[in-house]
Image: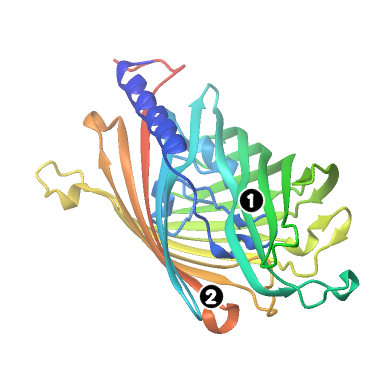
Amino acid sequence: MSLRMKSVITIIFALVLTSVYATGWGDSIFSINGLGEISYPVDGQARGMGGITLAFLEGRGVSFINPAIVGAVDTTTVTAVFLFEQRKVKDSTSRTNIYSWGPKFMRLVVPISHGFVIGGGIAPYSDVNFHLRDTGLHLGSDTGTPNEPYTLHVSADGGTRLGSVTLAKNFGNRLYFGLCANFLFGSITQEWRRDFSNSEFEDSDDLYDTHYFGQIYCGGIALRPHRRWTFGFLFSRSGTIEATTERSSVSGTMDQEKNELDFPDAYGIGTTCRLFPRVTIGADIYTRMWKKFRLNGTEVPEYENTTRYSFGCEVTPTPDKLASFFQKRPWRIGFYHKPWYYRDARGNRPSETFFTMGTSIFFKERRGTLDIALEIGKRGSIAENGAQEWVFRQSLSVVGWERWFQKRQY
């Protein structure tokens, strides 16, 4: 490993540790339902293009969506994505600004020999972070004091992560296959607290700590039938996730419950086209069959299938050494839209629409880049969902690469 690659890896791990210990997450207010806000783990280059990644063979292949894309990587590549997010939350009575910052994912991709490429990394799958308060509640009539008021506080924090191992194989520069094993793990903590205004009643506080573990497998194909056209196909197999919940209360009561979550299949198809020597456009369609989600074998009627539509464009740098600063940078724009996987209390589904843009700053001798992406979008609506979010995201991807296990050309 060269000194340059060691420096890149050292910077990445230092930033990750700083982010983990110095900051917290502030996820969507719509993360209240189910597992929370489901992540779409792509790198900074793809983020600037609306998240297109299923057939994008011109990049560095470090996204977690289509494992076949990894087969197009011809140099050892290490990547870390860091995300800053600001959300302006508004409902019928209040407005709030929420900020968060932290690492999004890390990945290492290594070409071995004979067209085989391996990859490994960790990325978020879902995040939950909310606090609700209801002051209009009273004890039930079965207690003998039906008019006794109390305030209910419900909060949750945590999420799940994916540990990924990928094996890909390329056949020349035309055909790519990939398989991926994703190990899902993590925990979500919920607190239910009941505060009485009457001091004669004892407040209650119940804590639910749920731990998740399971596997999700997927396979992908990428095809380049023409030097200007590429196609990508993805299939993610449903998996069973074990959820163990430990409940504790202020009275000292403790119990444990185990559940099984059947995660649904997912499918994806994408394409890219190089319109001109320096201009590439692309589109992805990604569907997850949330109606097949089961909790201990029972379906959740509020869950609905989701389809994400992504569109993007990239203009690559000019090779002219005398060109201006802006001509030597890649420029990206994109768009994506997706509904959430559940219906709210009103029977409506929140959805989100984002516009994206991005560029890159190359390290010396182009042994790495700093990919910068901006995402601006809206999630939900006050009229249909009772609340809405305007979201501003800025992601920074630190990327370094060099050749391992390959003979150098002198």
Q: Amino acid at mark 1?
A: Leu
**Secondary structure of the residue carrying numbered label 2:** strand
Image depth: mark 1 or mark 2 in front: 2
**Towards the viewer: 314 or 152:** 152
Is residue 323 visible in the rendered image? The answer is yes
| Label drawn at residue 234 | 1
**Secondary structure of the residue carrying numbered label 1:** strand
**Residue 324 x/y as whole percent:** 11, 50
At 71% from the left and 41% from the top, the residue drawn is 217
Is residue 275 visible in the rendered image? The answer is no
Vertical placement of residue 410 versus 50, above or below: above
Vertical placement of residue 357 versus 322, above or below: below
Side of 155 where 373 appears, left or right: left
Side of 146 where 282 appears, left or right: left
Vertical placement of residue 365 versus 347, above or below: above
Q: Quadrant of the C terminus?
A: top left
At 50% from the left and 63% from the top, the residue drawn is 310
**Residue 13 x/y as whole percent:** 42, 28
Side of 213 where 325 appears, left or right: left
Neighbour tally class for label 1: few under 14, some 14-19, many 20 plus, Cα within 10 Å: many
Q: Amino acid at mark 2?
A: Ala
**Towards the viewer: 336 or 408:** 336
| Label drawn at residue 387 | 2
**Residue 96 x/y as whole percent:** 43, 67
At 68% from the left and 53% from the top, the residue drawn is 191
Q: CA distance from mark 1 to mark 2?
A: 34 Å
First of labels 1, 2 by sequence position = 1
- Name the residue at the front extreme: 200
